[in-house]
Image: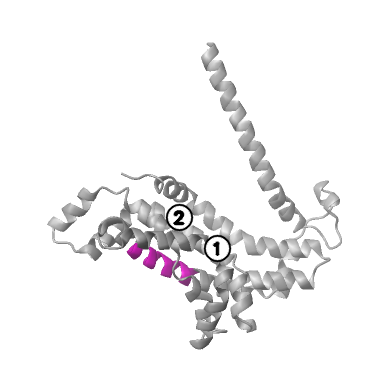
């Protein structure tokens, strides 16, 4: 074996070791939560890590019933899907306009979109609350959906991806008699599937994990989302760690499964948005 091949293999092993160590650091807390969720009440973390406890699904049944997660899951799913749908439509339209159309003030508008990315949502909560109150939407699903129906990140993401698609495809569609909306629907969006999946995952996961909007804009119990139900559950069962870890697992598993399903498209979308023809 040559010295060059030996150095290359050593470098690959070193990179693999660093990646495995990083994965271990990231996954260790999740593993502890998962194992703790099967332990009986009163079990300590040391007992769980030594596998000296019995395992049971009772914590999951108790957490599901006591936390009333069925309604919370329905509310979070409805809000997350609605916000994601709004963002995908608005981001596709605005992103295509900024990528392909020529109009005065285009660069200034793009800078405004980018500027919204550095403004925390918490700074806008008072004017948003006043607008929702004026529109009689406090304590409604509209208060959970409309404030984040448009997002600058989604617009920029799709704008960047649309710029990687050859203009010749649009010119060919124009020759065939397609208008702008038809080009967007039949040509651009099918080719932008990785970016759309990326936007879907980002938005859905962010809405699923959002605690701020339900906490500020709603007080009705029937509008509780998963994160709000989880926060209330933790206040009630502070000392019952196995039950709390079961509730955390219930709230986390759906988004983890969703990410694992779409991870390939997610990686392609993130990689391609940094490329510009």
Q: Is residue 115 visible?
A: yes
Q: Earlier in the sequence, mark 2 or mark 1?
A: 2
Looking at the rendered structure, the secondary structure element under dot 1 is: helix
Residue lying at 49% horizontally and 58% vertically, measured from the top left: 201
> How far across and how far down the image is residue 156, in percent?
40, 57
Task: Give the labeled residue for mark 1.
Answer: 206
Nearer-the-camera pick, 174 or 32: 174
Above or below, 133 against 241 in this view is: below
Nearer-the-camera pick, 206 or 74: 206
Q: How is the image coloured?
A: one colour
The residue carrying pointer 2 sits among few (fewer than 14), some (14 to 19) or many (20 or more) residues within 10 Å by Cα, namely: many
Task: Give the labeled residue for mark 2.
Answer: 198
Region in magenta: 81-94
Residue lying at 59% horizontally and 69% vertically, measured from the top left: 122
Residue 15: which quarter of the image?
top right
Locate residue 171 relative to residue 227 in the image: left or right. Answer: left
Q: Mark 2 and mark 1: span between their CA atoms?
A: 12 Å
> How far across and how far down the image is residue 190, in percent?
32, 56
Residue lying at 49% horizontally and 50% vertically, measured from the top left: 263
Above or below, 11 against 49 in this view is: above
């Amino acid at each position: 074996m040559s010295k060059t091949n030996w150095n290359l293999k050593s470098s690959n092993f070193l990179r693999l070791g660093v990646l495995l160590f990083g994965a271990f650091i990231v996954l260790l807390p999740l593993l502890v939560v998962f194992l703790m969720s099967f332990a009986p009440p009163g079990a300590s973390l040391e007992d769980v890590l030594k596998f000296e406890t019995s395992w049971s699904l009772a914590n999951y049944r108790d957490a599901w019933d006591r936390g009333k997660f069925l309604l919370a899951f329905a509310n979070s799913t409805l809000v997350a899907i609605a916000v994601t749908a709004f963002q995908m439509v608005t981001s596709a339209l605005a992103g295509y306009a900024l990528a392909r159309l020529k109009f005065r003030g285009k660069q200034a508008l793009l800078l405004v979109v980018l500027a919204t990315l550095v403004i925390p949502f918490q700074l806008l909560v008072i004017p948003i609350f006043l607008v929702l109150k004026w529109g009689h939407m406090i304590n409604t699903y509209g208060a959970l959906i409309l404030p984040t129906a448009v997002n600058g990140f989604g617009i920029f993401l799709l704008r960047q991806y649309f710029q990687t698609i050859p203009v010749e495809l649009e010119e060919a569609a124009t020759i065939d008699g397609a208008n702008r909306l038809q080009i967007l629907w039949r040509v651009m969006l099918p080719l932008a599937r990785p970016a759309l999946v990326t936007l879907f995952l980002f938005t859905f996961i962010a809405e699923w994990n959002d605690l701020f909007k339900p906490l500020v804009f709603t007080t009705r119990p029937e509008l509780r989302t998963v994160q709000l139900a989880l926060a209330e559950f933790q206040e009630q069962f502070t000392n019952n760690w196995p039950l709390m870890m079961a509730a955390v697992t219930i709230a986390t598993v759906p988004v983890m499964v969703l990410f694992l399903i779409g991870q390939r498209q997610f990686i392609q979308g993130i990689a391609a948005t940094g490329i510009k023809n």
